[in-house]
């Protein structure tokens, strides 16, 4: 029997598929992970195969706590970290635990499409918060919350990607970060911070996490949970992530029926990650990603600047995976698609990310292709936009 | 930094901990998994580290389909199988997708405690169905459903472990199996069949799954989803399972926001499992488990028969992990605990498994200890029960 394995990202012949938010296979650390798996089994033996502790192996939590202390300047206690199987499962679990009928969940508009999807799957219809060049519009948040309360709902969670946001690549501006945490305290809202791109900065180090800033705000630590991940900094197939939050929140997660039944949801792979953190290989891998993606980000942004017609613009992200292209008001992403795909380039259209179904933006991922293909992709996209505008 | 890994099962000094439903570390296939991990990386390369396809790798789905066809006589199509990260996460995901306010979820009483917990975490208060020596009392199910409807609720899901049930070790009697599927069709109820113990039979091969029987009942295939797992037949730490169901159900699972975001939730480990299935090592491991657990089941049952005072009884399971001890009506498990733990033996008391909080049963696991300790555990338990009965 053949051993058939396919990637999630389907690539159609002749199309530069900028629609997938997935890494380049050639960058993934196969050798390092293979060696770490053997070393891990030597160190952990059958414990790697058994039900793990609900909060995840101390080998990884301790290494992470040390790393977070060094990098972020706020050392989490071991009771403030749990290992997860990635950000989406952790968000799903927290939403299932904490959101009840009558509760509202707030999201950025535009916000991460599949997070919207997983919330809707739980019967939650998310409420959008306006978003601009400086990220989530914190000054307009109280108005959104009032509107939610007027509809008889209780604002419960705010899901946000403040650092190298998906889909725009933008980061929440410095002065807004602290204010957002203060508002969460005032409004008794739990911020669920999706911090997946923290390691992937290309110019200057990532801004402080909301979780980090929460320590400086009275009552802040009870109002922010940060979801971290090794999917973008190491390998998504390992399905390993973590969360940092208050001891009570960590316990609520770890003592839940699901986790109590399954034990750590990434027991085997989280121990591989622990070895890579312990032996320092992780830092080398992250640095390799950073160099490769920086070059790709540069290629795509430069390509777009040269290729986009007047009336369009693109973000210039300092990290992460994505560039966002804004289209002229009279061109939707849905209409553009019928020009772009025949021209050999794909994207995810704005409507997928928008609670209000606004469809005048495009998400382009620069992680999966090398610089030359990204440049060509930008040229094709520019050509497709021109065609679409001409045929109005 | 030390590399600290602990098992989920905490063992207190001097206590034979029959409360944990976990395998014996010494049986876990460390060498086989280590070798399979290397072979897997050779075969799959970076695809093992990438986002996997939503329905899971074909390498595992195809091997599973062939195995299920051979063992169960109903060959599932590849569009009728999805790879999961275990039964509890799959149940959690299906409940989140399918159950809405006003829907009722039915469970066996007694039923698996942590499944009750994960349903409650989603805001679902499960409804108990009576259970007797032949398993779920199928003839009383229509009455329960009428009661649910009279309360204005719609019966939506029935979660059941028909084969080597947790906590009792009992299996649903043959004649009840088909009738249960027929009732699910008549009542438009989805049966979620937790089939975790299928491989662990010790006397005669496991009874046919409800999923298998659904093919013989008009409309049956749309009303049963079977959740399978490698946690008991291989290693829980791999967090790998599968589901078989209708193509529509499989798509609903695989296309959900959570899975679409994360890809296959056990990408790396499911490929290890695929290698173990392809190269035949899996069969050897299962056979090893079966022999070891058969001996342990025999030791615990014989020990209990010799040690339990009059008025108590125990099940004699044909497979799985658990024996159930029934206490006399005037002794609760909660009261017994204060005698048992000082006597050096632990159990999970009935109330944890019961929607009605009935507390006159004990769940004992025979997987974690060897025969001698199990015999000693039975002696200690008998002594504790006698003491508790004398002190009335």
Image: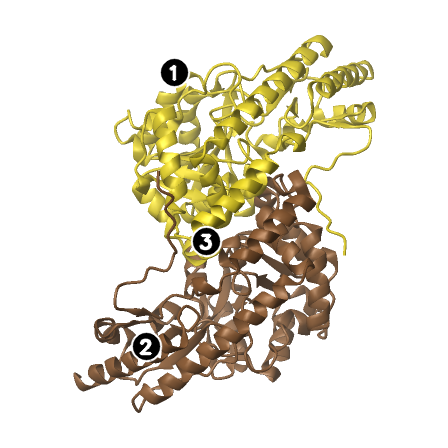
Chain colours: A yellow, B brown
Judged from this view, the residue extending furthest toward the left is B391
Residue A119 in view here? no
Task: Judge whether A7 appears above or below B220 on screen.
Answer: above
- Whether residue B91 sits left or right of residue A242 in the image: it is right
Labels 2 and 1 positioned on one and the same chain: no
Quarter of the picture containing the N terminus of chain B is: top left
> Which mark's residue is nearer the viewer, 1 or 3?
3
Judging by the rendered image, the residue that carries numbered circle 2 is: B377
Q: Chain of mark 1?
A: A
- The structure residue drawn at horizontal position 57% and vertical position 22%, both measured from the top left corner, is A168
Callout 2: helix, strand or loop? helix
The image's mark for residue A45 is 3
Quarter of the picture containing the C terminus of chain B is: bottom left
Q: Chain of mark 2?
A: B
Callout 3: helix, strand or loop? helix
Alpha carbon distance from label 2 to label 1: 62 Å
**Label 2 neighbour load within 10 Å: few <14, some 14-19, many 20+:** many
Q: Chain of mark 3?
A: A
> Which mark's residue is nearer the viewer, 2 or 1?
2
The image's mark for residue A175 is 1
Picture coordinates of residue A241 (x, y %)?
Answer: 47, 39
């Amino acid at each position: 029997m053949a051993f058939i394995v396919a990637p999630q990202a389907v690539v159609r012949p002749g199309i530069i598929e900028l629609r997938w938010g997935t890494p380049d296979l050639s960058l993934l650390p196969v050798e390092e992970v293979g060696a770490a798996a053997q070393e891990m089994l030597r160190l952990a033996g059958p414990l790697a195969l058994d039900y793990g502790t609900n909060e995840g192996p101390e080998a990884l939590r301790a290494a992470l706590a040390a790393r977070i202390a060094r990098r972020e300047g706020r050392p989490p206690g071991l009771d403030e970290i749990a290992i997860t199987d990635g950000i989406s499962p952790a968000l799903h679990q927290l939403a299932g635990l904490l959101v009840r009928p009558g509760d509202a969940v707030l999201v950025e508009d535009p916000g991460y499409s599949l997070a919207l999807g997983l919330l809707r799957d739980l019967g939650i219809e998310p409420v959008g918060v306006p978003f601009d060049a400086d990220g989530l519009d914190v000054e307009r948040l109280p108005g959104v919350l009032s509107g939610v309360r007027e509809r008889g709902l209780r604002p419960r969670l705010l899901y946000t990607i403040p650092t190298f946001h998906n889909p725009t690549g933008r980061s929440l501006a410095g002065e807004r970060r602290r204010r957002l945490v203060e508002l969460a305290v005032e409004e008794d809202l739990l911020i669920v911070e999706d911090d997946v791109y923290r390691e992937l900065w290309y110019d200057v180090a990532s801004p402080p996490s909301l979780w980090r800033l929460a320590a400086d705000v009275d009552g802040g630590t009870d109002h922010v949970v940060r979801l971290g991940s090794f999917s973008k900094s190491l390998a998504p197939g390992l399905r390993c992530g973590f969360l940092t939050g208050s001891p009570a929140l960590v316990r609520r997660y770890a003592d839940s029926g699901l986790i109590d039944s399954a034990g750590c949801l990434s027991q085997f792979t989280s121990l591989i990650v622990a070895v890579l953190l312990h032996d320092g290989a992780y830092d080398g891998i992250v640095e390799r990603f950073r160099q490769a993606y920086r070059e790709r980000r540069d290629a795509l942004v430069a390509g777009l600047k040269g290729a986009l017609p007047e009336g369009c613009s693109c973000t210039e992200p300092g990290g992460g995976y994505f560039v966002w292209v804004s289209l002229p008001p009279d061109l939707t992403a849905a209409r553009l698609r019928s020009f772009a795909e025949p021209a050999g380039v794909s994207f995810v259209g704005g409507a997928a990310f928008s609670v209000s179904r606004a469809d005048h933006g495009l998400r382009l991922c620069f992680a999966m292709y090398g610089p030359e293909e990204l440049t060509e992709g930008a040229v094709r996209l520019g050509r497709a936009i021109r065609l679409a505008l001409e045929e109005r």
